[in-house]
Amino acid sequence: MSKSNYDVLKNEEVLLRHPKLFDSCIVRYVDFAEDENFGYLCLQLCEYTLEEHISNNDGSLRLEELVYDVLDSLRSLHCLEPQILHRDLKPQNVLIDVNGRARLADFGISRRLPKDQTTHHTRSAGTEGWMATETLKEGVDIGYKWSTDVQVAGMLIYFILSGGGHPFGGPFERVYNIHQGTHTLDRLQDVVAKDLIEGMIDREPEKRPKVEKCLRHPFFWTSAKKVEYLRKVGNEKEVAIRRNTNQELISSLEECAGGVSYNQWRDKFSSDLVQMVDDRKKPYAESILGLLRFIRNLLEHNPKEAAKVDLMSLFPHLFGCVYKFSKSQGWNSESPLREMFTAEATIGPTSDVLSPTNYEDQVNLAVQESQHSFTEPTTLATRSITGDKT
């Protein structure tokens, strides 16, 4: 990069040399050099950008893992002391490495917060259409917080899961819709994914979840944890009533089911298994409530038989339906369901990232903090050496 725009390059170098970023989903720093006219930042070689991967639509990578990587990389920045705010999240600034892992890149306009501060005040920075609501101002002092990154990360997640869509519409109306808080997630069918994204892109910054909470969202739960959740919902007193006649409750559940009928749920199980769990005197209702109570009793009283049944495959939409319903009833914020949302996220690809020590050995570089200082650039550039080409 030309030294006429040197502050952006120096800023990126300083941040990427932070030792705690070497074992994260951040594009790896390799080396830095300079001559009379230019500065050179050498980074880990990646295969292509997230935008290119989604456009190619080759299906070689699991979208859920890409989503996890994006959030995990953001967590690496936000959990540092002090925090680093990225401020320019977009599909071109997420790179895919040779192992298919998504890595956050382009830190030219990122900022490390001063110690004991939570906000960075500056002019508007970022890329049009990929900026948080509260930053869509000109010529005024804007406070950047972790929540500004989270909203744009929510846009990125929708981009990944929808095959290139944007929750705030096309390029011409996008900025206006972000400002107004007008969005649509119609290209997604997964109600759990929608729930995650809707929380992240909320127009009000204080309502957005921190990235650590995003990674604990049910979207990332394992099948085993989802089954355990269904078991606990089956223990709710409203569900435990065998001959449930609460039509309002049933109607609300069916509405959450989105047109998927569960009236013939017995047909999904073997007749021997149904007979083993069923009670002829008080048969389970032909409804979702009946199915939930059946699942609860199957897991509680017949664990060996339950282990042979893949409930998530038999009822692929059930968890999303029940999660949405339970949230509307307030059950998720009460014990015993509440505790399930405080545990650490249980999925995520096995990390093959080198530790700081191994990385130092491999490239024979020190990982100490750079001694270069930098100041806010006079002109905030949104183009990066890593954002345009890989």
Image (cartoon, rainbow, N blue to C red):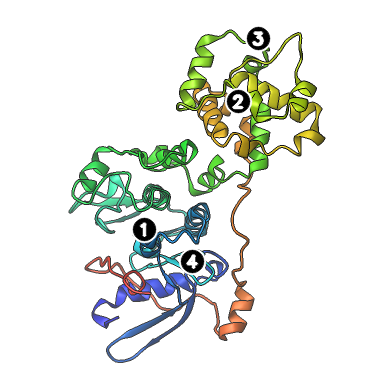
What type is the residue that disc 3 sits on?
Arg
Q: Which residue is mark 4?
A: 26
Image mark for residue 170: none
Question: What residue appears at the point 68 percent right and 16 percent down from the top-left corner?
Answer: 284
Local crowd at mark 3 within 10 Å, few (<14), some, or many (≥20)?
some
Q: CA distance from mark 1 to mark 2?
A: 35 Å
**Residue that label 1 marks:** 89
Relative to 53, is 231 on the left or the right?
A: right
> Disc 3 and disc 1: Cα gap in Å?
52 Å
Disc 2 or disc 3, which is closer to the eye? 3
Circle 4 packing at 10 Å, graded few (<14), some (14-19), many (20+), is many
The kind of secondary structure element at disc 2 is loop
Image marks 1 and 4: residues in contact by CB distance under 8 Å: no
Q: Position of residue 159 (x, y in %)?
A: 37, 51
| Front-lying residue, 260 or 385 | 260
> Helix, strand, or loop for circle 3?
loop
From mark 3 to mark 4, how far is it between C-alphas?
Answer: 54 Å
Q: Which mark is residue 334?
A: 2
Work out whether mark 1 precedes mark 4 in sequence or the reverse, and give the earlier one: 4
The secondary structure type at the circle numbered 1 is loop
Disc 1 crowd rating (10 Å Cα; few below 14, some 14-19, many 20+) is: many
Identify the residue under disc 3.
243
Q: Earlier in the sequence, mark 4 or mark 2?
A: 4
Q: Counting other residues with Cα less than 10 Å from the Cα at mark 2, is it few (<14), some (14-19), or many (20 or more)?
A: few
Say left or right for 277 vs 364: right
Tag 4 and tag 2, C-beta contact below 8 Å: no
- Whole-number angstrom distance, CA of label 1 to CA of label 4: 13 Å
